[in-house]
Image (cartoon, helix red, strand yellow):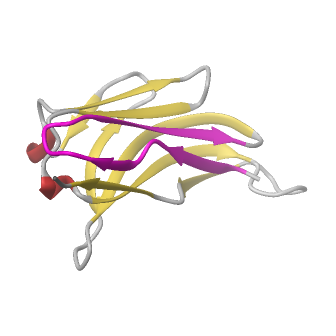
Amino acid sequence: QVQLVESGGGLVQPGGSLRLSCAASGNIFSIYAMGWYRQAPGKQRELVATITSGGSTNYRDSVKGRFTISRDNAKGTVYLQMNSLKPEDTAVYYCNARILGIPYSGSNPVTTDYWGQGTQVTVSS
């Protein structure tokens, strides 16, 4: 079974830093684009940053210059380094990956979007 497991959230003061990690596991043939999304209470989930398998990145305007997305293809892991955090960055952060893999025993390989379980990031003094 293919899954994404996140880690690294927590409580940080404004101006502080956190690093999120998301590791893919299971019967995986290829991992294409990976990304991070976030959802604050009462708001829709929004894109934070994406990275292609070749390393091209894209960020929402409000995090440019503060957040950095990266990936380790050998480990099937995507990271989000968050610096100069602001209270408005408070949200549950979800990783996403488009993966060619075998979703369950006996199935054929299929390309599917997978989501992590979410990790809470709280920026507060």
**Left or right: where 56 falls relative to 84:** right
User: Where is residue 63 drawn, in percent x and y?
Assistant: 14, 41
Q: Where is residue 61 in the image (x, y as percent from the top left)?
A: 9, 44
Residue 119: x, y in percent?
44, 55
Q: In this view, does 69 lie above or below 54?
A: below
- Residues in magenta? 2-25
Residue 9: say if magenta.
yes
In the displayed structure image, the side of residue 114 where residue 64 appears, left or right: left
Residue visible at 41% across and 48% down? Answer: 9
Residue 122 vs residue 27, the one in the foreground: 122
Between 28 and 79, which is closer to the camera in this rendering? 79
Q: Residue furthest bottom?
A: 42
- Does the magenta-highlighted stretch encompass residue 114? no
Question: Where 111 falls versus 28 (above or below)?
Answer: below
Q: Nearer the viewer, residue 13 or 40?
A: 13
Image height of 100 relative to 114, above or below? above
Q: What percent of the width, then of the height, locates residue 94?
A: 42, 55
Q: Residue at x 71, y 38 (%)?
A: 28
What's the magenta bit mostly, secondary-structure-wise?
strand
Give the residue drawn at x 36%, y 47%.
Answer: 36
Q: Name which residue lies at 46% across and 50% down.
A: 96
59 horizontally vs 23: left or right: left
Compare residues 81 and 46 and report the one nearer the observer. Answer: 81
